[in-house]
Image (spheres, helix red, strand yellow):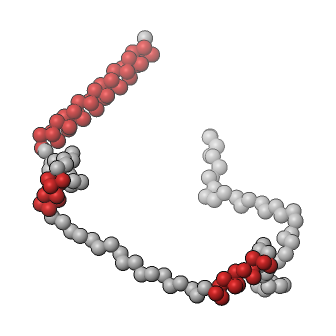
């Protein structure tokens, strides 16, 4: 008879915890002393800041109105482009996309099919050549 393979464990065994040194301090919820911030400024700089803060009142931020959104029709955009005597790739319509041309879409699709079809034929011929050379 053949031996059965051992059952596959569902979980890996836990890794052993190796702790050579205990922690240096244990946090018990309170600190032994309050936290202190140390300033790197000189006493002259601190005095100058105090004098400046007392002398100049705090400035209030000025209210800046958000820009207003304007909705424009296609006719006004085309008219503005005609007045400026400029033409853009979309024939004076600015950044508005031109209408879809079905003939151009068919040409693009046909080109894509021919391109990818030729790629498939090339790969198939390479595989057939490899099989023929190996089986020889």
**Is 72 rendered above or below residue 31?**
above
Apparent side of residue 43 relative to residue 109 in the rendered image (left or right): right
Apparent side of residue 78 relative to residue 122 in the rendered image (left or right): left
Count of numbered circles on the image: 0
* Residue 102 image point, x, y percent: 12, 44
**Is 89 rendered above or below residue 111?**
below
Is 20 or 83 nearer to us in this picture?
83
Quarter holding the N terminus is top right
Is 105 or 71 nearer to us in this picture?
71
**Is 83 rendered above or below residue 1?**
below
What residue do we see at 38% from left, 23% from top?
A: 127
| Residue 71 visible in the snapshot | yes
Quarter holding the C terminus is top left
Using the rendered view, name the quadrant where residue 65 is placed.
bottom left
* Residue 33 image point, x, y percent: 83, 85
What residue do we see at 70% from left, 80% from top?
A: 49
What residue do we see at 19% from left, 34% from top?
A: 110
Using the rendered view, name the quadrant where residue 32 is placed.
bottom right
* Residue 69 image point, x, y percent: 27, 71
* Residue 39 image point, x, y percent: 77, 76
| Residue 28 visible in the snapshot | no
Is 86 or 119 nearer to us in this picture?
86
Residue ranking furthest to the top: 136
**Is 2 rendered above or below residue 116?**
below
Apparent side of residue 130 relative to residue 44 in the rendered image (left or right): left
What residue do we see at 82% from left, 77% from top?
A: 26
């Amino acid at each position: 008879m053949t031996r059965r393979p051992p059952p596959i464990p569902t979980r890996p065994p836990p890794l052993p915890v190796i702790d050579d040194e205990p922690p240096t301090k244990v946090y018990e919820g309170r600190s032994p002393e309050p936290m202190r911030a140390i300033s790197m400024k000189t006493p002259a700089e601190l005095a100058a800041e105090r004098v400046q803060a007392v002398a100049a009142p705090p400035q209030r931020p000025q209210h800046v109105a958000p820009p207003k959104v304007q909705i424009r029709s296609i006719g006004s955009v085309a008219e503005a482009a005609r007045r400026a005597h400029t033409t853009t790739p979309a024939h004076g319509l600015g950044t508005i996309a031109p209408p879809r041309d079905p003939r151009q879409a068919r040409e693009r699709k046909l080109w894509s099919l021919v391109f990818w079809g030729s790629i498939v034929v090339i790969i198939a011929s390479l595989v057939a050549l490899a099989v023929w050379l190996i089986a020889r």
